[in-house]
Image (cartoon, rainbow, N blue to C red):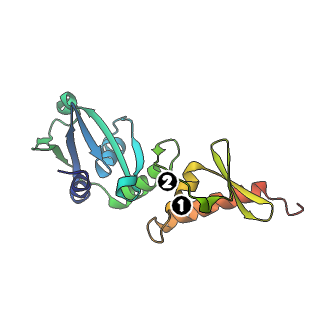
Amino acid sequence: MNFSEKLVAQSKFKGILLFNDGVFLRAYNEGVYILTELLGYNFKVNAMQLKKYNYRWVVTCAFPLNKLNVRLPNAELTEFGSRYNYAYDVKDYSRWFAQCCHNENHATSVSPKMDKQYTSEKSVNNCRAIKCSDGVYLKLNQKQVNYLLNWQQGYYSSEIDTKFIQSLKKILLTNYDPND
């Protein structure tokens, strides 16, 4: 089963699919949500954008295969790992996923190479100062730059887009002096 097939299978399954990954079992997206938020396991959660999959966000976690009977004693073994049925609210999952993907404390991303078209950007201490108008620069962190570079209409929920715009407005109002 390739990576895309794993993500599709997990999104269609109402519960957790755990995939063999060496001596670990790996969960993706909905499975991570159930394990960490609903079942309360304190796993290290990684959120990342995958360049190979058009910068699609994926959330993942893993635990040792030999701990399956302790963590999920009723899990059913399969040819790819195991499965565990668990009902969850899709809206709650969607909010968690959006928060997880855009929370700087959890997310890591693959940043695209900057082309010559971004010559108005200046690197400043792992941030970018983007020129908005004459003499006005907006200082953005790498996550904000990635969000803008990869933004497509309708890809993110309107709530995420609104929060992002509000964060930009806050930065602008904090650093903007109309007398300059």
User: Is 46 situated left or right of 159 in this image?
Assistant: left
Find disc 1 in the rendering and name its residue. 149
Q: Is residue 53 visible?
A: yes
Q: Quadrant of residue 169?
A: bottom right
Element type at mark 1: helix
Q: Quadrant of residue 75?
A: top left
Judge by depth and name the residue closer to the eye, 99 or 80: 80
> Residue 153 in the image: x percent, y percent?
48, 71
Q: Quadrant of the C terminus?
A: bottom right
User: Distance of mark 2 from mark 1, alpha carbons?
Assistant: 8 Å
> Residue 66 in the image: x percent, y percent?
19, 28
Pointer 2 local density, CA inside 10 Å: few below 14, some 14–19, many at least 20:
few
Q: Please give the name of the residue rendered at 85% of the width and 63% of the height, measured from the top-left corner.
A: 178
User: Is 177 situated left or right of 124 in this image?
Assistant: right
Q: Is residue 86 visible?
A: no
Label 2 sits on what residue type?
Answer: Pro
Does the residue at mark 2 contact the one at mark 1 (Cβ under 8 Å)?
yes
